[in-house]
Image (cartoon, helix red, strand yellow):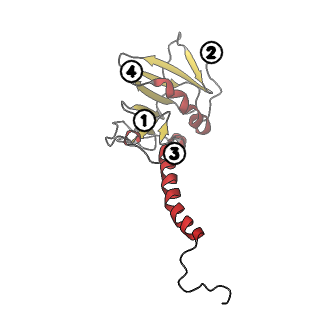
Amino acid sequence: MTAGTTRPGAGASPGRIATLAALPIALVAGIAAYWALGGFPSHANKPSAAAVPVEAPQLEPSTSTVCRALVAKLPDVLGGLSRRPVTAGGEQNAAFGDPPIVLTCGVPKPAVPADAQFMGLSNVCWFADEQRDRTVWQTVDRAVALRVVVPKAADGSWLVHLSAPIVATVPATDSEPAYC
C-alpha cells in the first residue's frame, strides 16, 4: 500500500469518531454559555414599541450639532434601562425605561432660584426641580442646556450614567455655580 491510502473495508478512525461526537457537544455548550452571559436579548430588555411623546423645537445650528453628538453617543441601554423611540426630534431627545425618563438637549437655560442647591455628578452640575409627580433635572454648567425628566415612579439614581456622554460631547461653561 502507498502512503495516503486506506485499507479496503477499514472503518472510521477513533480520532475521527471522537471529533464528530465532540463538535455538536461543543456547539451546544458554546450557545448555552453565550445565552447564560446575556448574549441573546431577553424580552424584558427590548425597548417598548410605543414612542415617547416629546417636543422638538428648532435649534440653532451650533446647538443642533452638539445635541446630535450627544444623542449619538448615548447607548441602547443606560443604567439597566432600555432606550425607547421618541415621537419627535430623535437627534435632540432620548428616552429610557418605562415609565420613560426623557433627556432633552437644547432647552432654554433654567431659571434657578437664588437659594437653589446644586448636585455635581461625575463632572456635570445639575439643578433638581422637585415636582408633584416628577423631578426635572437641568444642567447649569454646560454651553448647551440639558433637561432630564424623571417620573416619581422611576428610579432616578441612574442619572449619573449620563455624565460620560455629556462630558464627552457638551462643552462646559466657564460660569458654573460655586457650590457644584
Residue 74 at x, y = what percent?
51, 41
Foreground residue among 98 and 175:
98
- In terms of sequence position, does the residue under pointer 3 or pointer 2 come before the other? 3
- In terms of sequence position, does the residue under pointer 4 or pointer 2 come before the other? 4
- In terms of sequence position, does the residue under pointer 2 or pointer 1 come before the other? 1
Q: Residue at x 50, y 31 (%)?
A: 146
Residue labelled with disc 1: 96
Name the kind of residue labelled 1 in the image: Phe
Q: Secondary structure at mark 4?
A: loop
Foreground mark, 2 or 1?
1
Q: Is residue 69 left or right of residue 83?
A: right
Circle 3 residues within 10 Å: few <14, some 14–19, many ≥20 = some
Q: Residue at x 48, y 19 (%)?
A: 128
Foreground residue among 172 and 3:
3
Q: CA–CA distance between discs 3 and 1?
A: 14 Å
Q: Secondary structure at mark 2?
A: loop
- In terms of sequence position, does the residue under pointer 3 or pointer 1 come before the other? 3
Residue labelled with disc 4: 152
Circle 1 residues within 10 Å: few <14, some 14–19, many ≥20 = many
Q: Residue at x 53, y 9 (%)?
A: 115
Residue labelled with disc 3: 72
Residue 38 at x, y = what percent?
48, 43
Q: Is residue 161 above or below residue 85?
A: above
Q: CA–CA distance between discs 2 and 1?
A: 29 Å
**Mark sitting on residue 179:** 2
Tell me the quarter of the picture where residue 142 sits: top right
